[in-house]
Every structure is written in structure tokens, then in C-alpha cells.
Amino acid sequence: MYTQIKSILDILAAAVLLIVLAPITLGLMLILYIQNNGQPFFRQQRPGYQERPFYLMKFKSMTDERDTNGQLLPDNERLTPVGAFVRKSSLDELPQLFNVLKGEMSIVGPRPLLFKYIPLYSPDQRRRHNVKPGITGWAQVNGRNSISWKRKFELDVYYVDHQSFWLDIKILWLTVQKVIQREGVNQSTERPMQPFNGDN
């Protein structure tokens, strides 16, 4: 029952937030348009509900600079000052409100990861796709990038099994607190989150 109501609440919340945050969104879009040669957005195909593909949208925080062999430079060399700011402030996630409006994502749910990870999941971990992916989630307010992949997936599955209106409210409240305090964000060049390999 709640999942049906949640879809309506998601669309209403996304529409309101897009209107309220329009000055910030448009300002960042303009800055990143200029900085990234007309490409303010990062789009990547991700698995959504029941592993259906969709294109995740984020503000682009890194350039596409390459070395003499045509390979992308390391992340720390491509991350721009504005990009670093939008990451630390989580403003790079704002375009995902459009994904919510399209019904591809929810405000709250397990974060959408990469297709290449799906064969590495255990059957239990794979259940994270039994709900729509979210902009924020139970794992994000319980450590985000400072916890192991195994722990993240345990928290994702916990959310799948205990999804409720009040749990969503709790996650949203904790998200606001952690964004303000910038807790659990360790996307710096010194401590990047390692890719999931099936064991970590």
C-alpha cells in the first residue's frame, strides 16, 4: 500500500523541490555549462527497479581531459574546484529529481550502482533492486562511503524489508543533517571509495 502512495509523494516532492531549488539548479547548470564545454550533466546507464536500465543524471564534476594515449586522466586531475564543491555539498545529485519525476527513481531508496556489479551480488544483495533506487537511502545516512560494500548492501536490504513512511522521514531528516555536517563523504583524492569486487 505504501509503495503506491510513495510514488505519488515522490513526484509531488520532486516537483516542489525543482521549483524551490530552481535558482540554485539553473545557476550551477550555467557555471558547469561554461566550465565543461557545454556539458553540465553526467549521464550513465544504471539498473533501476527490477534491474531495468535507466539513465542516471548528475551535475558533471569532472572534465573529460585525456592523456597523450587518449585515456582519461585520473579522477583527482579531472575534478574541478566547482565539481569538488558540488560533490561535498551533494548538489551534484539535484538533477536526479528529474529521474524521480520520470518514475525511474524515488527520493529514498538504495543508491543506483553499476550494471557490472550485478553478477557479483549474492542473491540477498540482489534484492536491493526490489524497490526503486533513491537519491538518498538507509546506507547513505549510516556511513555512506565510510563503510564497507558488504555493510552498505546489508543496509539496502534492510530498507527493502522495512520500507515505511516513518523510515523514509527518518532517512530524509538524517540526510539533511549529514549534508550540513558533510559526514560520511570520503570522495577525496586521498580516500576514494574502492570499486565493488564481490568480496568487499
Image (tube, helix red, strand yellow):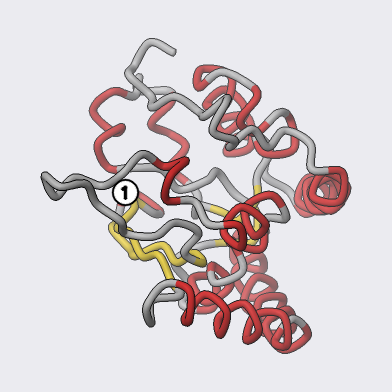
At label 1, counting other C-alpha atoms closer than 10 Å, the crowd grade (few under 14, some 14-19, many 20 or more) is some
State the image coordinates of residue 7 (x, y, percent, origin top left): 59, 69
Q: Is residue 26 found left or right of 173 in the rendered image? A: left
State the image coordinates of residue 32 (x, y, percent, origin top left): 52, 75
Q: Quadrant of residue 55?
A: bottom left
- For the residue pair 178 and 154, the one nearer the viewer reads as 178
Residue at image position (21%, 46%) is: 67
Q: Classify 143 as above or below 81.
A: above
Q: Classify 152 as above or below 78.
A: above
Asked if residue 1 can be seen in this view, the reply is no
Amino acid on which the number 1 mark rests in the picture: Glu
Q: What is the count of numbered marks?
A: 1
Quarter of the image that includes the C terminus: top left
- For the residue pair 23 and 99, the one nearer the viewer reads as 23
Q: Classify 200 as above or below 60.
A: above
Look at mark 1 in the image and give the residue it sits on: 51
Quarter of the image that includes the N terminus: bottom right
Residue at image position (63%, 37%) is: 159
Residue at image position (73%, 48%) is: 164
Residue at image position (64%, 60%) is: 86
What secondary structure is marked by label 1? Answer: helix
